[in-house]
């Protein structure tokens, strides 16, 4: 019933609005922001008027107060007089809301956050060191506790060991604890020790790498007609996992992705990191190649600026940003950084390159040249010796291909000759060369072919060919931290290194705030800034600005960019460890004050991995090329190449963690898609959580869940006894939700087992709300 | 429950109530069931009253030739075998360019309006007075992948929401036991680009197209698992509900948990209702024959059209049917021989399309349903290679038709040049076509926006002015 009431409230909002007043924060401000603020706001003040804060709306413009005039200006029939001048007129409903709000006195909150001028915006200011409030050991608790106290609230009680245990495992490694792990913690509930232990496990990297892959739009294929597999792109995915597990400092993590090939201490590893630059979708048959080229640069620029800086710089491609103090020039100045890059390919075929130091790569090239020479010399000898089984005229064609027919012979018989050569040629010399200089790992990267950069122009209205002024690389002016792009060497422009160094400059006001907020979001379900990819004027203000700044400063200056130290600080806080079903749901309904932990539905990866862990079938093999989970044949029917795209099921391989599952842009695994995996074409700010019936169909009826239910039933019989229903139920509960069943739960399940199978019961366990939620 | 829980971000994104819900708490707080909300009213989000509440897109995958279907060119007959002398580049992707080739199909005038239609479509032609052919469309790309994307999402790059997703987002669901946006592909395969063509892009996954199968179990994972009886399925659902409700009692403030309990009941009802739409047992044999179910050539598309009618009856908002799948001659992509190709694909689909129109008219659904016919582009008036019978891709000018609710039928709008190569009169970009479809469904393409990456995104793009094709409106 409550459910229906909830619907009615939303569908008929006027019914509650008319009862009270129009809410400035939720109704008026968003409307003004969307339709008016680009001309009457922090960037421009046409007619001397600002409409981005209550105090200025009341103050009016050059011609005095405007409150009496607003409604008539927006409802004006004459198009030349009507506001806003661009786009459709305001709707009748919007005008009505404005009218009511003004009629009721145009009220706004006393402490409205205002941005006096764009360069005074909070996230553009240097992060300063500050003391934390007294009274708590953990600085996070100090800031959160102070805020709670000022609002007459307190923390919720600390979660008990059972709840904490499951929350820690799912949060840090994305898997539920085993029975032995549960027993160990319940006997000695030392949370700090467990946190250290979990952060040291490889599963930490597998869990948290996926969060980063969301932000950088990872996929294994290019999309479009051929949707080809990106060769060796999985090395980048593994690089993220390994970097996190090794606690690579975040500044280094950023630098390697942008400029790992331009570093003085370049290595295989750092070059593989630049796979970041090539993750975007790519049409190998573009409609308009010049536009396509700029689209690719835009994709890199957009991902870099959103994922690493929290800026929507890509909006300044065609004109200065309408809402942010970002200039079109800023956009092209960053595009100039990436402009020297070229995609290694042979027509439509994409290529990977050996990754290593420059010396290693050139030594490898020399080795391969030697091997090629050995082979061609031997081939000649072999053909001349008459040992080949090929016809004489074919042999002659190989030795001296002149005519068209001879060339066709060569093409036709190449494979045959190669087979003969492979048998006949002694391998020792080649083996020795390879032993002396082993292969390098292949990396999927863009390359700069010269240190001489192409000229970058500002494109008027964003149109390729419509050249404006020449633009050199530079950092966005508003941030007031200059970047240094002067260090080109004989191989590359090193512009990306300049950009990367600027991004991780401790003076850069955005970088540390953005990553600290991202980490916070994955621990709490919401960021301190709830628009994690947008820290600009249009983004949300932080719920705890002092805490965010303290954390960001500490992260850079005391934790030396260590993400594990940041996790540890958060996970050991009372703020994180409090109950989610805690106090204050009514006083702090949106939990902006953090008076409790948030209950969250798990991401699809953690759900699928948990199913496999509980059924006992999870294959913990790490790294390597993508795997093919089982896919329903029906899902393939919608594809243009249904037979070729998905390898048949190898259950053991398919039972690896979901981060290794094939991410194909033209065909997402249905379970992942239906359970809200992010868009793979854009930097994701975070996962949405939807609840729709098709998810229930997938989790209740799919072949995957049915199969795992069978495995779980087998496991229960083996571990809890063939015929002991009570013990089977008890074990099922402990495996799935880390607790003993209540008496009532046990009773209804035992009743169920009188009529139905253990397999059915297992299917129910894997569908429980409690199983897919973490509390 | 208090409303303040849904306090939105202070960003321009919160300008419709639906987005406001999605964005509350950054969208990650476990808030859901927008489709349920929408289910309570037929078209909660329309900007103005409109006749059409649902639409069917008959997608002729591969690109049907306009000069062989709905755009007769007497001048092409005269110039048959001559070289094309115009200024634009003909053809795509370096394929050979032959001579101008007249249409081998005879055009006749049909209905009171005298709308000319080629003899490929005898059944569709019976509804000539209902068709509004737009002969002057053009788009931006020569390739199938980007062409299908542009026809479906308005953009040539992947990652944008499809027309059906926009309608789902704008108008919501009219029946929460059914998906809002249904896609049925060809047995030979899906279109090039596959799921990118019915993606929800940057919108919530709820709005994406759901693949629907015309035989067996229509939806993925709809059927009760093999080996489970219906009794066990219900017993298991009851146990799940019981346990979930015990759990909910410990944290009653979490409406998301209640929503999830409800979603299993909806899914259970969907099992029955969706399965009913592919059950044709109750349909009389005369109707089946009208749709061509008694002929192996026409049976597949006929079955899909008949199911389409049953989906429309159950309030599904947008249904997209693909004719042709896979590559080249298995689709309307008549590179090798456009004559045999089009005879095949028109022959497979025409009867069913005519039957669907007849059936919608007699059932009254016609007055609420918009029909859309066409492919990702047209084809060249030249042959592909001298002396050959294929035609290459042509995105400079091509035809699509609209029919049904709100459409002024019996007319052709705009024109291509004398040979049918370029749109020259009343040129309309494919985005104008989209603006028109939205308008017919009660949505203003300039106001139907979704805030994403700092911009109010639209189906019709944000950089160019696009216009509703007013002549198409009744």
Image (cartoon, coloured by chain):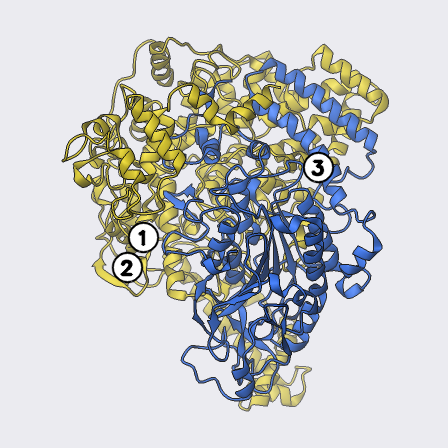
Chain colours: A yellow, B blue
- Res. A37 in view: no
Which class describes the residues within 10 Å of circle 3: few (<14), some (14-19), or many (20+)? many
- Res. B452 in view: yes
Residue at figure coordinates x 64%, y 66% from the top left: B331
Per the image, the residue denoted by label 1 is A317
**Mark 1 vs 3: CB contact within 8 A:** no
Judge by depth and name the residue closer to the eye, B271 or A407: B271
Which class describes the residues within 10 Å of circle 2: few (<14), some (14-19), or many (20+)? many
Q: How far apart are marks 2 and 1 (CA)?
A: 8 Å
Per the image, the residue denoted by label 3 is B270
Per the image, the residue denoted by label 2 is A459
Q: Where is residue B99 drawn, in percent x and y?
A: 53, 85
The kind of secondary structure element at disc 2 is strand
Q: How far apart are marks 2 and 3 (CA)?
A: 52 Å
Report the side of A53 relative to B422 (left or right). left
Q: Where is residue A204 drawn, in percent x and y?
A: 51, 32
**Mark 2 vs 1: CB contact within 8 A:** yes
Judge by depth and name the residue closer to the eye, B83 or A453: B83
Q: Distance between the residues labelled 1 and 3?
A: 45 Å
């Amino acid at each position: 019933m409550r459910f229906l009431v909830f619907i009615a409230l939303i569908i008929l909002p006027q019914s509650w609005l008319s009862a009270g007043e129009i809410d400035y924060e939720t109704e008026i401000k968003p409307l003004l922001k969307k339709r008016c603020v680009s001309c009457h706001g922090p960037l421009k003040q046409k007619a001397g008027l600002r409409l981005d804060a209550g105090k200025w709306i009341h103050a009016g413009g050059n011609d005095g107060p405007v409150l009496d005039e607003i409604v008539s200006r927006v409802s004006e029939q004459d198009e030349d007089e009507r506001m806003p001048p661009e786009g459709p007129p305001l709707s009748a409903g919007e005008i009505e809301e404005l009218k009511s709000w003004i009629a009721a006195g145009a009220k706004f909150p006393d402490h409205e956050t205002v941005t006096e001028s764009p360069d005074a915006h909070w996230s553009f200011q240097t992060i300063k060191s500050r003391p934390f409030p007294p009274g708590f050991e953990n600085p996070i608790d100090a800031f959160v506790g102070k805020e709670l106290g000022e609002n007459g609230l307190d923390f919720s009680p600390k979660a008990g060991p059972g709840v904490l245990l499951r929350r820690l495992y799912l949060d840090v490694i994305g898997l539920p604890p085993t029975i032995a792990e549960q027993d160990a913690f319940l006997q000695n509930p030392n949370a700090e020790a467990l946190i250290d232990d979990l952060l040291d496990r490889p599963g930490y990297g597998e869990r948290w790498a996926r969060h980063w892959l969301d932000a950088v739009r990872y996929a294994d294929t290019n999309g479009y007609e051929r949707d080809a597999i990106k060769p060796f792109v999985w090395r980048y995915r593994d690089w993220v996992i390994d970097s996190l597990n090794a606690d690579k400092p975040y500044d280094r993590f950023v630098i390697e992705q942008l400029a790992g090939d331009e570093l003085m201490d370049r290595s295989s590893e750092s070059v593989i990191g630049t796979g970041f630059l090539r993750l975007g979708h790519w049409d190998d048959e573009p409609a308009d190649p010049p536009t396509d080229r700029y689209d690719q640069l835009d994709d890199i620029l957009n991902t870099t600026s959103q994922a690493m800086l929290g800026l929507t710089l890509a909006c300044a491609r065609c004109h200065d940003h309408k809402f942010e103090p970002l200039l079109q020039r800023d956009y092209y100045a960053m595009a100039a950084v990436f402009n020297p890059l070229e995609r290694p390919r042979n027509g439509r075929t994409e290529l990977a390159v050996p990754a290593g130091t420059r010396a290693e790569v050139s030594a490898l090239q020399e080795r391969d040249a030697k091997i090629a020479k050995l082979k061609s010399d031997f081939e000649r000898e072999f053909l001349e010796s008459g040992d080949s089984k090929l016809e004489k005229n074919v042999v002659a064609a190989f030795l001296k291909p002149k005519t068209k027919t001879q060339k066709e012979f060569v093409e036709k018989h190449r494979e045959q000759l190669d087979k003969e050569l492979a048998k006949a040629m002694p391998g020792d010399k080649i083996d020795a060369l390879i032993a002396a200089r082993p292969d390098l790992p292949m990396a999927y990267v863009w390359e700069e072919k010269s240190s001489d950069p192409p000229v970058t122009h500002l494109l008027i209205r964003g149109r390729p060919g419509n050249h404006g002024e020449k633009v050199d690389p530079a950092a966005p002016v508003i941030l007031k931290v200059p970047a240094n792009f002067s260090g080109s060497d004989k191989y590359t422009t090193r512009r990306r290194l300049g950009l990367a160094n600027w991004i991780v400059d401790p003076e850069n006001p955005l970088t540390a705030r953005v990553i600290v907020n991202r980490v916070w979001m994955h621990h709490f379900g919401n960021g301190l800034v709830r628009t994690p990819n947008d820290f600009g004027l249009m983004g949300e203000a932080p719920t705890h600005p002092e805490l965010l700044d303290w954390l960001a400063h500490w992260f850079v200056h005391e934790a030396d960019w260590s993400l594990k130290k940041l996790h540890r600080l958060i996970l050991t806080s009372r703020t994180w460890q409090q109950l989610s079903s805690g106090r204050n749901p009514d006083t702090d309904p949106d939990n902006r004050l953090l008076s409790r932990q948030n209950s969250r539905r798990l991401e699809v990866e953690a759900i699928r991995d948990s199913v496999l862990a509980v059924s006992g079938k999870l294959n913990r093999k790490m790294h390597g090329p993508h795997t093919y989970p089982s896919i329903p044949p029906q899902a393939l029917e919608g594809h243009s190449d249904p037979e070729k795209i998905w390898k048949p099921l190898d259950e053991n391989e398919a039972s690896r963690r979901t981060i290794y599952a094939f991410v194909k842009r033209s065909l997402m695994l249905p379970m992942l898609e239906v359970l809200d995996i992010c868009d793979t074409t854009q930097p994701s700010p975070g996962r949405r959580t939807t609840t729709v019936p098709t998810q229930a169909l997938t989790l209740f009826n799919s072949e995957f869940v049915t199969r795992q239910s069978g495995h779980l039933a087998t496991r229960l019989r083996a571990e809890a006894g063939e015929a002991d229903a009570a013990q089977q139920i008890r074990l099922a509960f402990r495996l799935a939700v880390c607790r003993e069943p209540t008496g009532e739960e046990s009773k209804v399940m035992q009743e169920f087992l009188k009529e139905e199978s253990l397999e059915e019961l297992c299917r129910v366990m894997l569908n429980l709300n409690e199983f897919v939620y973490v509390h | 429950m208090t409303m303040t829980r849904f306090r939105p971000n202070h960003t321009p994104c919160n300008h419709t109530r639906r987005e406001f819900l999605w964005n509350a708490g950054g969208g990650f707080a476990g808030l859901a069931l927008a489709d349920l909300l929408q289910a309570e009213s037929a078209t909660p989000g329309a900007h103005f009253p409109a006749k059409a509440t649902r639409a069917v897109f008959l997608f002729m995958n591969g690109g049907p030739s306009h000069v062989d279907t709905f755009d007769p060119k007497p001048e092409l007959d005269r110039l048959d075998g001559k070289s094309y002398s115009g200024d634009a580049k003909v053809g795509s992707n370096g394929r050979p360019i032959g001579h101008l080739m007249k249409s081998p199909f005879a055009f006749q005038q049909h209905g009171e309006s005298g709308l000319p239609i080629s003899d490929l479509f005898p059944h569709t032609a019976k509804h000539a007075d209902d068709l509004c052919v737009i002969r002057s469309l053009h788009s931006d790309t020569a390739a199938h992948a980007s062409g299908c994307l542009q026809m479906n999402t308005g953009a040539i790059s992947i990652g944008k929401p499809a027309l059906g997703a926009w309608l789902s987002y704008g108008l919501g669901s009219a029946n929460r036991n059914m998906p809002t946006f249904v896609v049925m592909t060809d047995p030979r395969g899906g279109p090039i680009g596959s799921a990118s063509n019915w993606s929800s892009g940057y919108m919530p996954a709820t709005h994406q197209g759901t693949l629907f199968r015309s035989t067996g179990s229509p939806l993925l994972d709809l059927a009760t698992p093999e080996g489970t009886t219906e009794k066990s399925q219900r017993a298991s659902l009851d146990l799940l509900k019981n346990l979930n409700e015990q759990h909910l009692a410990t944290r009653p403030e979490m409406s998301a948990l209640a929503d999830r309990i409800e979603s299993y009941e909806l899914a259970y009802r969907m099992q029955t209702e969706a399965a009913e739409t592919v059950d044709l047992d109750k349909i009389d044999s005369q109707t089946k024959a009208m749709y061509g179910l008694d002929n192996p050539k026409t049976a597949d598309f006929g079955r899909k059209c008949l199911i389409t009618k049953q989906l429309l009856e159950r309030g599904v908002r947008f249904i997209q049917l693909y004719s042709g799948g896979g590559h080249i001659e298995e689709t309307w992509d008549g590179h090798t021989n456009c004559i045999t190709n089009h005879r095949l694909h028109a022959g497979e689909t025409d009867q069913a399309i005519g039957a669907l129109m007849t059936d919608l008219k007699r059932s009254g659904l016609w007055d609420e349903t918009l029909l859309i016919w066409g492919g990702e582009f047209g084809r060249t008036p030249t042959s592909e290679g001298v002396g050959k019978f294929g035609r290459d891709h042509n995105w400079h000018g091509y035809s699509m038709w609209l029919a049904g609710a709100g459409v002024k039928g019996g007319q052709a709008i705009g024109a291509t040049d004398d040979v049918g190569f370029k749109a020259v009169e009343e040129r309309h970009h494919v985005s104008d076509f989209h603006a028109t479809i939205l308008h017919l469904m009660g949505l203003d393409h300039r106001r139907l926006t979704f805030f994403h990456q700092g911009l109010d995104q639209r189906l019709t793009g944000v950089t160019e002015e696009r216009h509703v094709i007013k002549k198409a409106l009744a």
